[in-house]
Image (cartoon, coloured by chain):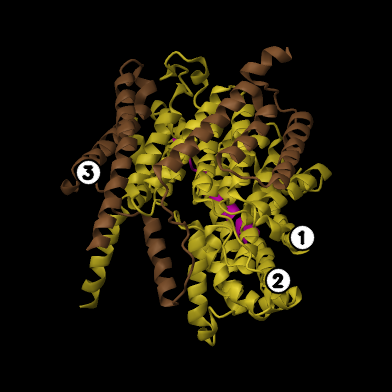
Amino acid sequence: MEPYVAALKAIIQWQNIIIMLIGVLIGVIGGILPGIGAVQTMALLIPLTWKMDILPAFILLISIYATSKFGGSLTAILFNIPGDNPNAVTLIDGFPMAKQGKAKTAIGASATVSILGGLFSSLTLLFFMPFMYQLILNFGPAESFMLALFGLSAISAVSSKSIIKGIMSGAIGVTIATIGYHPLIGSARFTMGLLFLRDGISMVSVVLGALAMAEAINLLLEKTSIVPEGVPLTGSYLEGAREVFRNFGLFLRSCFIALIIGIAPGAGSATAGFVSYASATKTCKNPEKFGTGDVRGVIAGDTALHACAGGDLLPTITMGIPGSGAMAILLGGFLLHGIAPGPQLIKLHLDLVYLIIFVLFIAHCVSVLLSVFFSKGLEKLTTTRPEIIAPIIIIFCLIGSYVTREYWQDMLITTFFGIFGYYMRKFDYHPIPFVLGIILGPIAEVGFFQAISATKYGALIFFIRIPSLIIFLCTLIVVFWPVVEKIYKKSIPRKRY
Amino acid sequence: MENNTIVSNKKASKLNGELVVVAAYFIFSGIILIACFGYEKEAIAVPVLCGSIGFVLSGMRLIYLLFPQLKLGEFKHGGLAAEFDSLKEGIQKDLHLRIPPEETSKSKSSQEEIKAFIYLTVCFISFLLFGYLVGTFLVILACCLFYNYKQWRVILISLISLYLIIYVLLYKLLEAPAFYGLLLEPLMQ
């Protein structure tokens, strides 16, 4: 059976349809609830996918990833508070529109670009996947190691305050990942005689602790919840949809901006949204209207948020290089189900790749319908107090860490990494490189060992093979970006004179 | 002048707080490096590499935290994301946008932090002693007690929803492994 047929058949099974609906609902709720975004929601749901088959598990995860941004747009338009950081761009024009009595028009426009942006993301993946497949056929263990190294350094770049702190986070993550049996030799390392450490430190426990539980602690300390300002839900959804088609050129431009920014490591949908918005103000007529409740602002910003998903997923699926926190969690999901992301994923699980592409689009559509129909009810979620949200997150973290391996010690690890993750954030050590270190560490170790043992050149093999060398050079550019930037900036005035 | 003093005091207390975390990282990396001597060569390539990176970088940071005037481990250079952030800020400035800050900058007192950590420990102990089926209720109730939250209607709805999700969906339908905790397990048997 053709892989795309298998993927479509899996999607139309009634159990999977229900899973998708649940995923979409959870994603939208996660987007709406204060303090929670796609990363936390996906991290919390990962343990539940443990006993699921691969395809339903990824239907759930991709549904959450695809839909949380639309949930965040709703709160940005109705309450002037972005559900998640990237949605900050939506409120610039979305909330003024709502105040002018055009809340439904803004939501209609946001919903339409969400569907069309999802379609663009899926088409992007379908278009680029064959090229990437041809490219990665040449990859061996040396490239696997280099890709893991590049993934780690690329995600360290998300630490905007200090790249070195990002590298430190990644290094400690990889070090912790080496606890337990060596993946190839089989000797136990750093276990201190403890039986449960022989299987290593559970990736799920660490992810739940450092990302979700740390956020729960933060919620308890911040004690913020959205207070509705009482903007009436007036206007017309259809009018919003019509506006998108009237400004279709703007929509397409925003899509391509989002695609390029999505692929770049370290730049997420938040950046894509703002760059697209800025481009709209420079290329559209009557730029002075932007920021005062212009629907084109909502179209430009929200299109980029949703169209970014294709560029975000492409390097993650094809090469195992995540460009954002949500992709790092997805990578963890692959590993939890015994799938090595990158070349092996495309070679052996092409049906899963097609499933991700299709679900990405369908989930966008379902989320829009669900949110528009239940917008009144979803509105109430924004007043949920952190005293209720935080313990629920903690409960799911503890249950999730226990059910994956059935060791009570894993709950202790989650609690420990919850506090650890909180302090990491507090002192500007980004937790995502740390989590990625745990996820990519074993892949890097296996790649390193296989590459070295299969050649007479030793470590030189990483620099003799052209693809490996190219990836290594890319890694150097990312790590030494401050130096590269200085050289680049110096070269510009020279050219002028 | 006064503002400058407040800012520098804040920075100093942040650096002091970071000192504990970095010192722990430094010691952890050192222990890993020393422990590597006990294993065969093939098994320690990656831990030695990462342990060394961690040891050197955390050592440099430690020096900076102890002697800030040396600037050795200041690590102030932002990564690629810093470029994108400055691009974003530039756009916001150009467009005169007023956007609420991404993260609320409320200062968190160490007392509040300790309270949150104690609550977290209570949650863990509840799960450890009573398992997740009973522990779930204790965690919610403990939060109400700790943070003086008394919206009983909301609490009741949350408890019923959690019962449905955890007991009916997770335990019965998805057949999650049963765990009654170290205290209840012997009684259940």
Residue shown at 62%/17% (left/top)?
B182
* Outermost residue, left side: B70
Camera-side mark, 1 or 2: 1
Q: Colour of chain B?
A: brown
Residue A108 marker: 2
For disc 3, the marked residue is B64
Alpha carbon separation for disc pair 3 and 2: 53 Å
Along the horizontal axis of the image, is A271 left or right of B35? right
**Secondary element type, mark 1:** loop
Secondary structure under tag 3 reads helix
Q: Nearer the viewer, residue A109 or A214?
A: A214
Could you say which quadrant of the image residue A111 lies in? bottom right
What crowding class fits label 2: few (fewer than 14 Cα within 10 Å), some (14-19), or many (20 or more)? many
Rendered shade, chain A: yellow
The C terminus of chain B lies in which quarter of the figure? top right
Label the magenta part by its dominant secondary structure.
Answer: helix
In the picture, the quarter occupied by the N terminus of chain B is bottom left
